[in-house]
Amino acid sequence: MTTAVNRTLDTVLDDPVRASLFGAHSRFRIGDGAVVRYPPEVARFVGHPRCPSAADFAALARLAVPGAPVSLRGVRGPLPPGWTVADRLTLVQYDGSGLRTAQAPDADILGPADVDEILDLVQRTRPGPFERRTVELGTYLGLRDGDGRLIALAGERLHPPGWTEISAVCTDPAHRGHGLATRLIRAVGHGIRARGEVPFLHTSAANSSARALYEALGFRLRATLPLVLAHPPSPTPGAS
């Protein structure tokens, strides 16, 4: 499913969604077969086999949220009849074994009471998908300005065995250039390391500035993979 670069021995990163949903995030799992997903108000991600069969695509269609595309991670080649592609992206996955971590005592631990502020910052900076209950996936840290406004964010998302994903790294445009993202990445990584786990993350292959930052912090490219956003066939009228 991935094209590995400096591939680690731990293959749970090949399908971190499924590994998370059958592990630390099992309480969120919808489905029990080859295809599983998070509740849409928590995360948009779906775990599926590396080469989905016709039965797997049927399960993906059943678990799809009406009107929303299904995220097909690592799927190459044509889709079954009736599926329509909304977008094709290329993701890169980074192994954070080399990240130097440090605490950020002035960072706030964010929770449900902070969701409106988080969503506002995410909407303005677009680090990736973030839903109203995404904060339940792990620890999210934020930095505030002198007026108490949230200006930077980073946190934990996918949680396969032995690893935790750093995600939602973003800074208010008016406060960029002061190392806030670096501080939060190191701080989130500190919490991950304290559990004896290793940080990893994903970003768009086209996001050269983010990639340069992650590589400067010690992240190592592990894999490059396609992400297809596709809509399943419309249900047949009268079908049960």
Image (cartoon, rainbow, N blue to C red):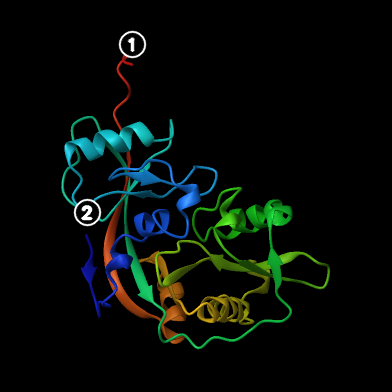
Picture residue at 45% right of the left edge, 52% below the top:
26
**Residue type, mark 2 in image:** Arg
Q: Position of residue 59 (x, y in %)?
A: 29, 36
Q: Which residue is at the front of the view, 58 or 217?
A: 58
Picture residue at 70% right of the left edge, 75% below the top:
107
207 sits left or right of 51 in the view: right
The residue singled out by tag 1 in the image is 238
Q: Position of residue 113 (x, y in %)?
A: 74, 54
Assign a secondary structure to mark 1: loop
The correct choice, above or below, for 129 with respect to 40 in the image is: below
Q: Quadrant of the C terminus?
A: top left
Picture residue at 42% right of the left edge, 79% below the top:
96
Q: Position of residue 225 (x, y in %)?
A: 27, 62
The residue singled out by tag 2 in the image is 50
The correct choice, above or below, for 98 with respect to 132 in the image is: below
The correct choice, above or below, for 16 with respect to 31 in the image is: below
User: For residue 125, which quarter of the picture?
Assistant: bottom right
**Residue type, mark 1 in image:** Gly
**Label for residue 124?**
none
Report if residue 170 is visible in the image.
no
52 sits left or right of 10 in the view: left
Report crowding for label 2: few under 14, some 14 to 19, many 20 or more residues within 10 A (C-alpha): some
Q: CA distance from mark 2 to mark 1?
A: 32 Å
**Residue reaching furthest to the right:** 147
Picture residue at 63% right of the left edge, 78% below the top:
180
135 sits left or right of 27 in the view: right
